[in-house]
Image (cartoon, rainbow, N blue to C red):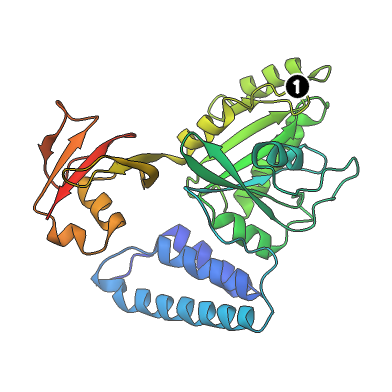
Amino acid sequence: MPANLTPQYMEAEEALQRAITPEEKLDALEEMLRAIPKHKGTEKMQADIKRRIARLREASEAARKKGKADPYRVEREGAGQVFVVGPPNSGKSALVGALTKAKVVVAAYPFATAWPVPGMMKHEDILIQLVDTPPATGGNCPPALAASVRGGDAVIIVVDASIDSCLDDLQDQLDLLEDRRVISDGRPCMVVLSKMDLPGAAGNAEILIEAYPEARFALVSVQSGAGFQELPGAVFEMLGIIRLYAKPPGREVDRAAPFVLKRGGTVADLARAIHRDLSRTMKSARVWGSARFDGQPVPREYVLSDGDVVEFRT
């Protein structure tokens, strides 16, 4: 059977040939695996790519244990990992610091942030990880940094709305993220316009929103606090996730630590998230929330909604 390789696969294969660092090679191989058509004619190719990915990951882990950890790599925590990027002095560090209390470096001079700095942002009863990053420009975006951002669940682009170059700054960031294949695969992205308290910001924001009608925008000011109350909810919606609560039979709902699934998750998906064997051993499930009536019995394929309570019986 012919492989019928896609243009996306061919581009990733060319990127592998150009790759120099292990991070670049791993990224190209992962893109090849995502883009390769999944059928019998490519099974051997898929297996070979997976073996090469496994070898690179093993080498990376061995280097990490020897104290040669990638300084751009950030361990994932919380309900989602969102990388915050932007040009120098855009206000991204101040944004992350205000939302998470992380020990970011906020300074009047450019490139004050040298390495990624993670922090946890609270949204109602869950935590979402925000990662402040070094300023990204065409001439200052190391492959390892781009690889880390690609590994996240979403991206926030911060642009200073008070300066005349804000339109060019946003386009430069979009071009850079597209070139580094960060947002080329449909990864969720939001544009945060910062420093909205400064003169000229409101007018510039109108121009930006009109110029990019398909983009998600949030307008904030660290100085005044404007926009910060709504931002965690907007990030939650961008991530496309739902919170679900387990109810042991005959007991109260455990709301202390909700389970998080991608939107569209089913009863069977939640069972697997709770315990790998529960999906196999469950005999029935009941749902409170999105069901037609509280405690309605539902099949394994039932699609859950944010806030649903699920009781499993085994």
Where 112 sits versus 164, above or below? below
Please state which of residues 121 and 48 is positioned toward the viewer in this rendering: 121
> Residue 272: where, in percent of width, then height?
26, 57
Q: Is residue 128 visible?
A: yes
Most distant residue in the right direction: 109
Give how far across and how far down residue 41 sits, in percent.
27, 72
Question: Is 211 placed above or below 81 here?
Answer: above
Q: Residue at x 46, y 66 (%)?
A: 32
Q: Which residue is mark 1?
A: 224
Report which quarter residue 162 is drawn in.
Answer: top right
Q: Residues within 10 Å of mark 1 (few under 14, many from 20)?
A: few
Specify the amino acid type for callout 1.
Answer: Ser
Question: x and y percent of residue 114 in the render?
Answer: 80, 57
Residue 212 on image: x %, y % = 60, 27
What is the total number of numbered labels drawn onto the structure image?
1
Describe residue 183's horizontal placement relative to residue 251 as left or right.
right
Using the rendered view, name the quadrant where residue 200 is placed.
top right
Q: Is residue 33 left or right of residue 285?
A: right
Give the residue at the far front of this rendering.
251
